[in-house]
Amino acid sequence: MRRWMIAVLAAALPATAQQVTVTPRPDGTAVVNTGTVGARITELTLAVTVGPDATPVRLPAGPDSPVKAEWEAQVEPEGVRLPVTITNQGQATEPALVELALTATVVGDGALAVWNGLETIDPAAPRELTGIRGIFPLACAWTAAQAVGLGWSPDEWHSWLRHAWQPEPGGGSLSVGSRLVLDRGQSETMTFVLLTTSGREAPRQPVARFQRMFEQWFRPATGIDQRTNLNGATYNAWTGRPAPENCRRTRSGWEWCYAPFRRTGDTYVREELWDYQPARPISAPRNLPAAEYRAWRARQLANGGPCDVGMMCYLASGVWCEVTLARERYPNAIITDPTVKTLFDTPWVTGHDNEYRVFPGAPGYAEVVRDDLRKLAAENPISGFAFDTAEGGARWQHPDARRHPRGRAWDKDGIYVDEAVGIAELMDYVHTLRRDGLTMAVVSNPTGRPSYLTAFRSDAVMYEGTPWETMGGSAADHLRLFCGQKGLVYWEDWLLENQVDWQAMTPAQIVEAYGGLADYAILEGLRIGCLPTPRMALGVPKVVAWLPVMADLMSRGWQPESGLTGLPQLDRARYGEATLAIGNRTGQAVRGELSLQGGELEAARAYLLSP
């Protein structure tokens, strides 16, 4: 029998920090103390190389070295920060192409497990992650007794990252690093992070500690429309006739106001850009004159009032632009990375345009996009902006990338800036805009493998999938780690036709299939703090009945660690400091004991879900 119990606890969970000390040596290695049992670091090594041929820099670098490195350990309650500042002290006119990595030699008493920031991997096999998409800023290794984590600060801008694991007798080496581009005389800092926890609930407990170290990226913002932390309305307030009752019953707090413009790349709708030759016929209401279309858009956005939702005005993160507009006005913004799709000559954002992939921070284009957003916020009743296709992962390689002020990286093809840097800069700009005393919010679709730059800057996030499928190879629980305590929703409908052969089923069997999927959606939603949107809830009474509870829980803030031990076959989740959710999806009765670390369970409120 599938059951969930939710109960309010009497006491908060205590911190379980373990002390980490790091004593750097002049040669770039360090003496590290991470305890005496479980997984532990025996050596820490900083490596700096210059150029595509990876010429090593001998540390400490002398005055004749092309770059120098300076570092100092900073011990905090949750762990250790190790800022490493690299300075280009050479005389060459070309930038220094630097790669730096911090490598920890890890040994373990007992079976060792490894999570590389994306997934749990086989500790007996080498594994390397590079790029930016899907990489959480922490990797860890653990035994049942203790876990150690190695990561880097999300406060800094990176376009290329590397997480690697190399097995060795008795353990292995865990490495994290990045590539930097430094002009002559320029300095840049990469702050590494070390932490330890018990081995219980790893890798979730190390992730929880990391989230506390950098809590500003994981807690809900306070100055925005607070409805942003509720459910997404899935067009019940945007297209067609508004449906306030649907929004109320599904605890919807924000709306994804899709593509309210005629020409991709002209988000505001400018008179001088209105008339052009599209690739396919333009349908209503985009076939109105520009002024009439802006008036129609304003009326549609006003639906947020009766529906009591914050309207999020859509833009495709500034990364798509109608081809003629891009060629004529923003040729330097066009992304030519051959490893990703850079041209849609089939229906994409508007349906009638062909669109180039562009870098939203390119000179000339960046200023126009920002002006569009400023005008939209000033003239329309909106609470923020909806950033679609916000995952990043495309390289902007135009010569202007060599002069971009942040996030430059390099590879065999030269200097570039990842698209995610430009999206993140645009999100930062949105957070400078205000309306009715509130900061404009950012709701994003960063896919199942987001970049840290965009996911961390989002105030709420959609997972454009279902509880039973993956996006880009990752399920919604990986995206939840990036969201922290912020709102997360499943955006798709049931997609029943992808799950069963419904044409071969009787009506009763179809109803039963929906019932099973409904149970699963509730179970998964409670496990990771993800709300089924109206697309999944309306017409399914069980889901509608549970949404008030689920929305209340999510408002308390989903936590990576539950604090519970025992009965591993049960799902468990914690919200805030005092609410637990426990679920049994085995189909069998489970008997035994669950232990709560440092507290007692006091069932002040309890709810049961039965099929």
Image (spheres, rainbow, N blue to C red):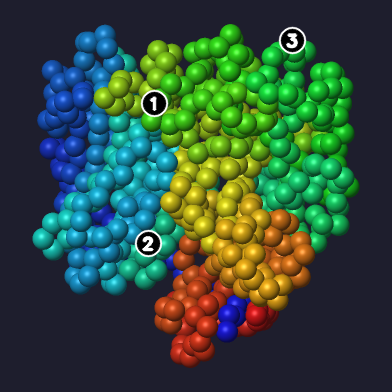
What residue sits 60% from the left and 13% below the top? 324
284 in relation to 573, above or below: above
Badge 3 amino acid: Glu
What residue sits 87% from the left and 34% below the top? 299
Q: Quadrant of residue 328?
A: top right
The picture places residue 271, in percent across and down from the top left corner, at: 77, 13
Circle 2 SS class:
loop
* Label 2: few (<14), some (14–19) or many (≥20) C-alpha neighbours in 10 Å: many
The picture places residue 110, in percent across and down from the top left corner, at: 20, 72
What residue sits 59% from the left and 70% below the top? 520
What residue sits 48% from the left and 62% below the top? 560
Badge 1 amino acid: Pro
Residue identified by numbered label 2: 203
Residue identified by numbered label 1: 338
Between marks 3 and 2 in the image, the one whose residue lies nearer the viewer:
3
Examine the rendering and report whether any part of residue 340 can be seen: yes
Badge 2 amino acid: Pro
Residue identified by numbered label 3: 272
Examine the rendering and report whether any part of residue 481 can be seen: no
Q: Is residue 521 left or right of residue 313?
A: left
Give how far apart the Cα atoms at labels 1 and 2 are: 35 Å
Disc 3 + disc 2, Cβ < 8 Å: no
25 in relation to 596, above or below: above
The picture places residue 404, in percent across and down from the top left corner, at: 44, 19
22 in relation to 57, above or below: below
Circle 1 SS class:
loop
* Label 1: few (<14), some (14–19) or many (≥20) C-alpha neighbours in 10 Å: few
